[in-house]
């Protein structure tokens, strides 16, 4: 049993080194047990809080949140397009993959919304109900998920060339809703 302990300690040291939390010659900053990382949310410099009026700051956060949601939706759409383009898979496999990705995205949104609505507001200076903390959490979660999807599925696929819009004349096909009059 004593031999298992050094192995456990070695695995922990390796894990910490891989995570970048401990490396030779680099000590982590001392922090009280149970204390939050100082100013975690102020690291998001999307909107310059000290340079604008509070109303403009809140509007900037709201716009940044909407933009991050649109970027996340675009990445989900790209992932679906990448799956759809996989000719090496049977249609049933692609369909299952897309359904599972959709389910994973739904579960991510449930977690994100609960975390940002219920937990993140307590992490700020003003406590529960803080719009700033909630919005910064949403922006960070959306951005992180979009980066993850981009890394996993790659850059967006090139758009397919659009064909002409509207009804087109084809040989042997009627393009009118009713048959032409008989002479």
Image (cartoon, rainbow, N blue to C red):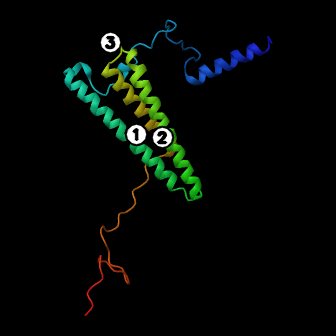
The residue drawn where x is 49% and y is 35% is 107
Real-space Cα separation, disc 2 to disc 1, in angstroms:
9 Å
Label 2: how many Cα within 10 Å (few below 14, some 14–19, many 20+): some
Secondary structure beneath dot 1 equals helix
Where is the C terminus found, in terms of image quarters?
Answer: bottom left
**Closer to us: 178 or 117:** 178
| Of callouts 3 and 2, the N-terminal one | 3
Secondary structure beneath dot 3 equals loop
| Of callouts 3 and 1, the N-terminal one | 1
- The disc placed on residue 149 is 2
Give left or right: position of 114 versus 18.
left
Whether residue 149 is situated above or below residue 88 in the rendered picture = above
The residue drawn where x is 44% and y is 34% is 109
According to the image, label 1 marks what residue? Answer: 72
Location of residue 69 (image quadrant): top left
Label 3: how many Cα within 10 Å (few below 14, some 14–19, many 20+): few
Real-space Cα separation, disc 3 to disc 1, in angstroms:
29 Å
Give left or right: position of 154 versus 48.
right
Tell me if label 3 and label 2 are in contact, CB under 8 Å.
no
Q: Nearer the viewer, mark 3 or mark 2?
A: 3
The residue drawn where x is 52% and y is 12% is 28
- The disc placed on residue 126 is 3
Q: Residue 60: x, y in percent?
A: 25, 29
Where is the N terminus found, in terms of image quarters?
Answer: top right
The residue drawn where x is 43% and y is 26% is 114
Give left or right: position of 176 versus 152.
left
Whether residue 94 is situated above or below residue 26 in the rendered picture = below
């Amino acid at each position: 049993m004593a031999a298992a302990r050094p192995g456990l300690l070695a695995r922990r040291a390796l894990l910490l080194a891989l995570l970048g939390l401990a490396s030779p010659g680099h000590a982590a900053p001392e922090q009280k047990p149970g204390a939050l990382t100082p100013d975690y949310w102020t690291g998001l410099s999307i909107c310059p809080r000290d340079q604008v009026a509070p109303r403009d700051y809140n509007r900037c956060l709201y716009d940044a949140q909407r933009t991050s949601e649109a970027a996340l939706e675009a990445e989900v759409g790209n992932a679906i397009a990448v799956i759809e383009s996989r000719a090496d898979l049977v249609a049933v496999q692609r369909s299952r993959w897309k359904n599972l990705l959709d389910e994973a995205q739904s579960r991510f949104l449930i977690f994100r919304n609960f975390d940002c609505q219920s937990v993140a507001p307590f992490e700020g200076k003003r406590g529960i109900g803080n719009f700033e903390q909630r919005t910064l959490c949403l922006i960070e979660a959306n951005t992180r998920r979009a980066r993850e999807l981009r890394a996993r599925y790659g850059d967006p696929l090139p758009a397919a060339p659009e064909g002409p819009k509207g009804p087109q004349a084809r040989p042997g096909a009627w393009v009118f809703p009713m048959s032409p009059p008989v002479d």
